[in-house]
Amino acid sequence: MVEMDDFRILMDAGINPKLIGHASLPLFDKVKDEHVDAIAITHCHHDHVGSLPVALKHFPQANVMMTELSYFIVERVLHNSVNVMHRQREEIGVKEYPFFSHRELDEMAHLFQ
């Protein structure tokens, strides 16, 4: 979290690729009572963008900012994540997967800038 005066920016919203399930997510609960004005995505690797839909559930008022290149691929990357989470739920039994659905992703895509 970066703070400038009263403006708060969450830098990236990734997942830990070495962990599975809820353990792979950032600790959004640690800042759940904080106001977040923006989420800045540095690039579209999963460890930087993989939990963006989860972050937006915690901080629905936040603007999402990213580079133009990231903007063009972020939806594809996240839709692929949904597919992978469905597969991992079936193959290795991760019950909390998927963290978000294709529909939820489609509904929040207009927030990406």
Image: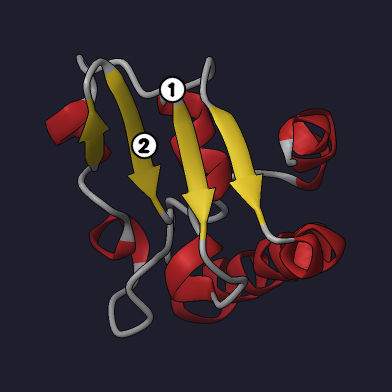
Q: Position of residue 63 (x, y in %)?
A: 59, 28
- Name the residue that disc number 1 marks: 37
Q: Which residue occupies 22% across, 21% down?
A: 5
The image quadrant where one finds the C terminus is: top right
Left of 36 or right of it: where is 97?
right
Q: How many marks?
A: 2
Q: Which residue occupies 53% across, 62% down?
A: 50
Q: Position of residue 81 (x, y in %)?
A: 65, 67
**Marks 2 and 1 in Cβ contact (< 8 Å):** yes
Please tell me whether residue 18 is drawn above or below residue 11 in the rendered image.
below
Compare residues 103 and 29 and report the one nearer the observer: 29
- Asked if one can make out residue 79 in the rendered structure from this viewpoint, the answer is no
Please tell me whether residue 34 is drawn above or below residue 92 in the rendered image.
above
List the single residue furthest toward the left.
Answer: 30
- Name the residue that disc number 2 marks: 9
Q: Quadrant of residue 29?
A: top left
Which mark, by number, is residue 28? Answer: none
Q: Which residue occupies 36% across, 24% down?
A: 36
Q: Circle 2 — which element?
A: strand
Q: Quadrant of residue 83?
A: bottom right
List the single residue furthest toward the front.
Answer: 5
Q: Position of residue 16 (x, y in %)?
A: 32, 73
**How is the structure coloured here?**
secondary structure
